[in-house]
Image: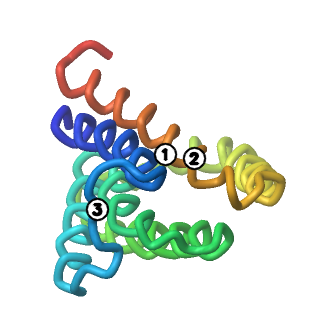
Amino acid sequence: MAVLGLISILFGAYRPWVERGGGIVASSHSPAWVGSLFGIAAGSTSQIAHAGGPPFQMWVMPRRLPRDIFVGTTAIFFAILNWIKVPAYASLGQFTSENGVATLVLLPFAMLASLAGVFLVRRVSPERFYTIVYWLMIVAGGKLLLDGIGLA
């Protein structure tokens, strides 16, 4: 987790620097097999530590998709990824009555958070959207780094 956190921090800081004219720009049109590697990394880190966002973002963000397409692609990717994990969680006995009750209690908050997310994304200008996502990636990377080295 520490390595993923460090990579997330570096990527989140590096890409805005590159986009402002610094350094060598990595191609945003890499071959599909490279995307498959990032997909495997996103799936693996999501299964192990619910941390699939950074590898996914490292593949998608350089493409500079329009804001709404980026958000929609992210939602669909992780919805599919989470459904793929269901059999593994079932075989591990994670679907208990206690977890079911917790799910029902938290469901209204999840729905409200989703609606708040839609509201906020629509309020952010497309120009500032990627800057905010890069900063959030650095914050998430910091959390993963701290978790990985045992300080959080």
Colour convention: rainbow
Residue 48: give x, y in percent of width and height.
22, 49
Q: Give the Cα distance between marks 2 and 1.
A: 5 Å
User: What is the C-alpha distance between the residues marked 2 and 3?
Assistant: 22 Å
Report crowding for label 2: few under 14, some 14 to 19, many 20 or more residues within 10 A (C-alpha): some
Instruction: Find residue 84 and report its image quarter.
Output: bottom left
Disc number for residue 103: none
Asked if disc 2 and disc 1 are in contact, CB closer than 8 Å, the reply is yes
Q: Is mark 2 on a helix, strand or loop?
A: helix
Point 55% across, 74% down: residue:
65
Select label 3 or label 1 by which is in front: 1
Report which residue position mark 1 lands on.
134
Label placed on residue 42: 3
Q: In which quarter of the image is residue 81?
A: bottom left
Q: Earlier in the sequence, mark 3 or mark 1?
A: 3
Disc 3, disc 1: CB below 8 Å?
no
Nearest the camera: 41 or 91? 41
Q: Residue at x 44, y 73 (%)?
A: 63
Q: Name the residue under label 2.
A: 131
Q: What residue type is labelled 1?
A: Tyr
Q: In this view, does 68 lie above or below 128?
A: below
Q: Looking at the picture, which amino acid does disc 3 mark?
A: Ala
Quadrant containing the C terminus in the rendered view: top left
Residue 78 point in image, percent of width and height: 45, 67
What SS does tag 1 mark?
Answer: helix
